Amino acid sequence: MKLAIPDRFSRLFDQLHANLFPRIDLELRVTRTRLARSIVSAQFALLGVWAVGLLLFRALNSQSRIANDLAGVAFLAGAGALALWLLRRRFLNTAGYVISLSWFLFVIASALLVPEYLVFISAAFFLPIFVSGAVVGGWSPFVFAFASIAANSAAILISNSAGTVPGFINQSSLLVYVLVFAVVALSAALISNSLSEQIQRSLSSLHQQADQMAKLAHTDPLTGLSNRRHLFEKLESEFARAQRYRRPFCLLYIDMDGFKAVNDQFGHLFGDEILRGSARSMRAVLRGTDLLARIGGDEFAVLLPETDLVGAEHVAAKLRKALAAYGGQMSPSIPSLTLSVGVGQISEEDDAIEDILARADKAQYLAKSAGRSLTRTQEDLEPVEQA
């Protein structure tokens, strides 16, 4: 029972922290970081104009007192500089709180120093509410909304007791003013929170759609394997890696023997099912780092990182065995399925992926010409080319 209370408080603290410092995905973080920098840049621009205006006013009127105003400018400028420093170190939520809190404190100080303009100054309380919602999100706008309600109510009561409250606010309208401000502040927080969540949902939806489009662009719709485009992209990447680190890799070019006869005899729908089943059976015996792709019709390719010719021939035998096991599950009236495989390996003389592609393709053609269910490597091409 003694452990239940700390656990309860721990869960409450975790929930509070998660809502005050919400985690966001990378894309939304980038968007909010840009927004925060834009807010700080606009803040610096306004402060610069304000400071120049104060100095000009002081030059025209030597009796004017601008010390408090310049102190406010310096305070907000320092807070903006701190926020930029935090943003450069990727402390987005903390930077958002620094920007919002600096304006919140500035409004409170202004209300205390110039109470006769309290009603007009109190409108600036909405700035930290919207800024926190846009940059931080979560419960942050409600935190500043309740803090603004409390601060504004305290300021109006203090001003009223000191007799410095604006003349159009009397005792009977004081409560109405406080209530109206509270309703507007909470409404602003609700709007800010809703907009923040809607933007996050929209970006998440767009991110998911982009992932789906990328997957569709790299996937063969019939078998679910990688398509020719994805194979070539991975081949380019593996080619560069293998050349840089002088590591081996092989490429298998595969043609299904007898598939055309099955397709002609039993129809295209059955042929499509044969292709899907064959793809599943071959993928099941490959490593997670290997890439099996359908490059068209009944032709497939396998990218084998960190594999030499001997290892590639072993993989070809495993694929042939897996396909035979799949074919054994079908009716005896269906012709047996076998593979003709050509194997190419990267060499020091290769300048581009087309070199290894050409050797694998020639080796596969050689295997196909020699009969069914054979594997030929680029080493088998040398006697043929010499002849």
Image (cartoon, rainbow, N blue to C red):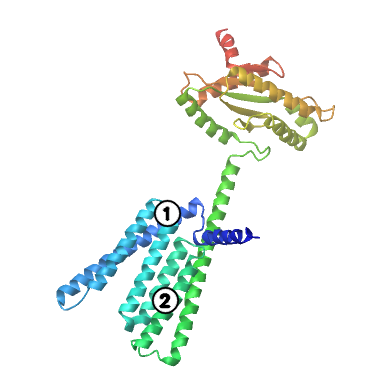
> Which type of secondary structure does the marked residue at label 1 adopt?
loop
Foreground of the two, 371 or 11: 11
Judging by the rendered image, the residue that carries numbered circle 2 is: 151
User: Which amino acid is tagged 2?
Assistant: Ala
User: Which amino acid is tagged 1?
Assistant: Phe
**Residue 308's quadrant in the figure?**
top right
Residue 73 in sight here = yes
Which residue is pictured at 45% across the width and 92% down the height? 172
Disc nearer the start of the sequence (1/2): 1
Foreground of the two, 343 or 363: 343
Cα distance in 3D space between marks 1 and 2: 27 Å
> Which type of secondary structure does the marked residue at label 2 adopt?
helix
Foreground of the two, 21 or 297: 21
Residue 132: image location, x then y, percent:
44, 65
* Above-or-below relation of 231 to 367: below
* Image-based side of 379 in relation to 59, left or right: right
Which residue is pictured at 57% across the width and 51% down the height? 209
Quarter of the figure that contains the C terminus:
top right
Judging by the rendered image, the residue that carries numbered circle 1 is: 91
Which residue is pictured at 54% across the width and 51% down the height? 207
How busy is the neighbourhood of tag 1: few (under 14 within 10 Å), some, or many (20 plus)? some
Residue 338 in sight here = no
* Above-or-below relation of 51 to 230: below
Residue 84: image location, x then y, percent:
35, 56
**Residue 215's quadrant in the figure?**
top right
